[in-house]
Image (cartoon, rainbow, N blue to C red):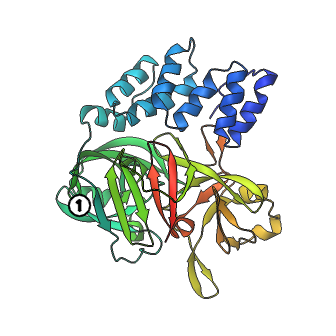
Amino acid sequence: MRPLWPGMVKETAAARSAWQAGDVDRAARLAAAAGDEQLPLLADLVRGRLAEALSRYDRLRRPRRALDLPIADALLHLDQPGRACEHLRRRHRRIPPKLALQRDHPMSLKAAGPVELPFADQPLAPYLPAVEATLNGRRTLLHLDTGGTFLVMGSERAAAVGVQSVSNGRLFHGVTSTHARAGLVGELNLGGTVLTNVPVDILPTLAGPQDLVIMGTCLLRRFLSTIDTPGDRLLLAPRGSAVPPGGTRMPFHLWGDHFMFAAGGYGELDLTFFVDSGLVQLLEDGGTLRQAAVYATKSQYRSWGFAPGELSGTHLRAARPLRLGPLEQDGHLLSIAPGRRAPWSELGGVRVDGLISQAFLAQYAWTLDFDRHEYIFRPG
């Protein structure tokens, strides 16, 4: 993302540095004190304070073009795809075909109350839990992946469940850029909770062994969702439901439509992780197949302090504890992503130091509270 305030005065250099390091609250305070109007707006967006962000935007005399798409995402999070399209039109921006579908066929949700969906017994269960649902009346496993959007599936699977689609540019599947199509599932039934006109990203790379249907963050955020891996279940309660007391709470931030990032670390080093429960990197370790807890490039690992000689293989063992918020775990494997730069290495100007996966998250029942932008972790 291009800097939002080129020619920045010296007083806001500390705000930019804090923002790049993922210290959103401090960045917003420093920017506001220096008279900057754009960075506090971005901070409101990633913290889920959407009404405040839109109010700030309306007061800007000359909004930068770098804010156009984030504001459209905010309107989409508020279930206003029509306003999002109109905003992009006024800013002389192309309206993505997927957004036009959402405008013309708004999604709806009908839930009688909380639902509990048991995890399915399937080969990827230890690494990528799935629940049973029906898509347009067809029974289907949905794999839980916070690195995904609403629903994500391959071309053949989309055709099999009757999804009509349109070309939608290119998206990343992992580190691979691929042509994408977009469509809608007419009806998704999750244990009696029924959603209509659910957006679908269709990727031709989801074929063969990767022929899976993904349920991502954009769907999970419709609920107070709890992914309870130790209990082998997914709990979906209506947004605004009471959160059980106790547990370890930590803030997360949301960039774009589904990129959640949060503070973490390696030993004493503070890092920012993209929280991607769908990352499945399986590695041979002493005759045992294990899931990597982190996926990052060699350059990212070098910034953690690893020497080039330690990065000659496909993975390495964490010599220090991994952290997510205040949670720490030892003994994990770290997988090395190909290429010099990953597509998720920066989210809205925030430096991302790697992806943290289900290998770390699986030890907890974790609740995603999008009203407070908090995770609540409870041990299994």
Which residue lies at the image location 33% right of the left edge and 56% below the top edge?
236
> For residue 13, what is the image quadrant?
top right
Give how far across and how far down residue 327 sits, in percent.
63, 62
Which residue lies at the image location 71% right of the left edge and 43% below the top edge?
21
Which residue lies at the image location 67% right of the left edge and 23% below the top edge?
32
Q: Along the line of sight, which residue is nearer the eye, 25 or 109?
A: 25
Q: Secondary structure at mark 1?
A: loop
Left or right placement of residue 17 versus residue 57 in this view = right
For the residue marked with disc 1, what is the amino acid?
Gly
Q: Along the line of sight, which residue is nearer the eye, 374 or 123?
A: 374
Q: In the rendered image of this protein, does residue 182 appear above or below residue 8?
A: below
Q: In the rendered image of this protein, does residue 284 appear above or below residue 115?
A: below
Give how far across and how far down residue 79 sits, in percent.
34, 34
Which residue is under mark 1? Answer: 191
Left or right placement of residue 37 versus residue 102 in this view = right
Left or right placement of residue 246 versus residue 14 in this view = left
Give how far across and how far down residue 198 sits, in percent.
28, 46
**Circle 1 Cα neighbour tier, 10 Å, few/some/many (<14 / 14–19 / ≥20):** some
Q: In the rendered image of this protein, does residue 99 appear above or below residue 224?
A: above
- Extreme front residue here? 245
Left or right placement of residue 270 versus residue 163 in this view = right
- Extreme top residue here? 61
Q: Along the line of sight, which residue is nearer the eye, 239 or 270?
A: 239
